[in-house]
Image (tube, helix red, strand yellow):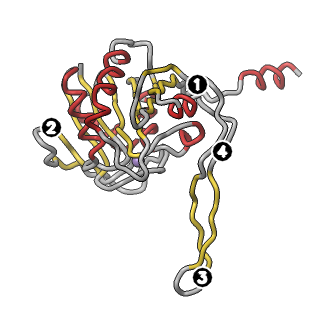
Amino acid sequence: MRMLLANDDGIYSPGLLALARCAREFGDVRLVAPDVEQSSMGHAITHSRPLRIRRTPIEDFDAWRVNGTPADCVAIGLDGWGGADIVLSGINLGSNLGNAMWHSGTLAAAKQAALLGCRGIALSTPTGEAEPDFERLAPYVKLVLERLLPEAALKLVNVNLPREPTGIRWTRQSVRHYDGSVVPGEDPMGRKHFWLTVHPIEEVEEGTDRWAIRNGLVSLTPLRLDLTDLATLERVAGA
Ligand code: MN
C-alpha cells in the first residue's frame, strides 16, 4: 500500500513524524507537507504564484516540503508520486471536531485526496496545557489504520484521538454549536485589534465526535464531499 502523508502543521511537526512511524508498518510512505505551519487555512489552493517542492531530511523517510497549503501538498504529492492508495493527514496538534472541520487544513488535505479520486483520512489530537504523548497514542493510531486501510469503500474519514484513548467509536459530526468568537484587544500603540478564537462547548450530543473525545474514545466520522441539503432541495424543487 502506497500512503502519501501530509498535514497542516508543517513538515517538521512531531505529529507527522508520529504518523509516519505508525504508517510505515502498513506499506510505503512518502511525506509531502507545507514548509511552514498552515493551520486553519482550510481548503485553500495557491494559484497566483508558482510552487516549489524540495527534499527535506526527516529521519530516513522520503520527505518533501512545499511552499504552499495542505491541499497544494496533496495535489503536488499525488502528481509527483504517480498517485497513491490513500492520503493520511496529521496527526494534527489540536482536535478537529464539529464545525472546526470547515476551517481545518488537516481535513482539507484528506478532502483534496478525495476530490482527486484518492482516499483520505485526517487524524487529529487535542493539545493545550500538555503536548500530545504520541508514544501513548501510537497503538491506537495503528488500530485505526488496521481498521480503515483495508476498507476501500471508506473514501473520507475524520479521525480524532483523545489524550488517553480507551476505545474506538464511529460518530457523526457535532453541528449544533459553533464555538468560534471574536475577542477585541488593543495593540501597544492603542489601536484596536481582534483575535479569532474558540470557547469550550459544555453540552455535547451523544454519538457525535465531540462526545466521543469527551468520553476518552477515538472518534471516526465518515464524511462525504456532497454538501447538498437534500431535504431542502426536495422541498423547494417540489414547491
Ligand atoms: Mn494544524
Q: Earlier in the sequence, mark 1 or mark 2?
A: 2
Who is closer to the viewer here, 121 or 76?
A: 121
Query: In the rendered structure, which disc, 3 or 2, sits on the residue that comes first in sequence?
Result: 2
On residue 172, which mark appears?
A: 1
Amino acid type of disc 3?
A: Arg
Instruction: Name the residue: 32% across, 56% down.
Output: 36
**Amino acid type, callout 4:** Tyr
Q: Which residue in the protein does label 4 denote? A: 178
Q: Amino acid at mark 2?
A: Phe
Q: Quadrant of residue 150?
A: top left
Q: How far is disc 1 from disc 4 in space, using C-alphas?
A: 16 Å
Neighbour tally class for label 1: few under 14, some 14-19, many 20 plus, Cα within 10 Å = many
Q: Report the side of 167 relative to 60 (left or right).
A: right
In the image, the residue with mark 1 has its CB under 8 Å from the nearest atom of ligand 1: no
For marks 4 and 3, the one nearer the N-term is 4
Q: Quadrant of the C terminus?
A: top right
Q: Is residue 229 above or below residue 55?
A: above
Residue placed most toward the observer, 82 or 57: 57
Gap in angstroms between the C-alphas marked 1 and 2? 34 Å
Query: Which residue is depicted at the point 28% across and 41% down?
Result: 16
Q: Secondary structure at mark 2?
A: loop
Of callouts 2 and 4, which one flags the residue occurring earlier in the amino acid sequence? Answer: 2
Note whether residue 195 is visible.
yes
Residue 187 location, x and y as percent? 54, 80
| Mark number displayed over residue 191 | 3
Mark positioned earlier in the residue sequence (1 or 4): 1
Percent x, y of residue 157: 46, 25
Label 2 sits on residue: 61
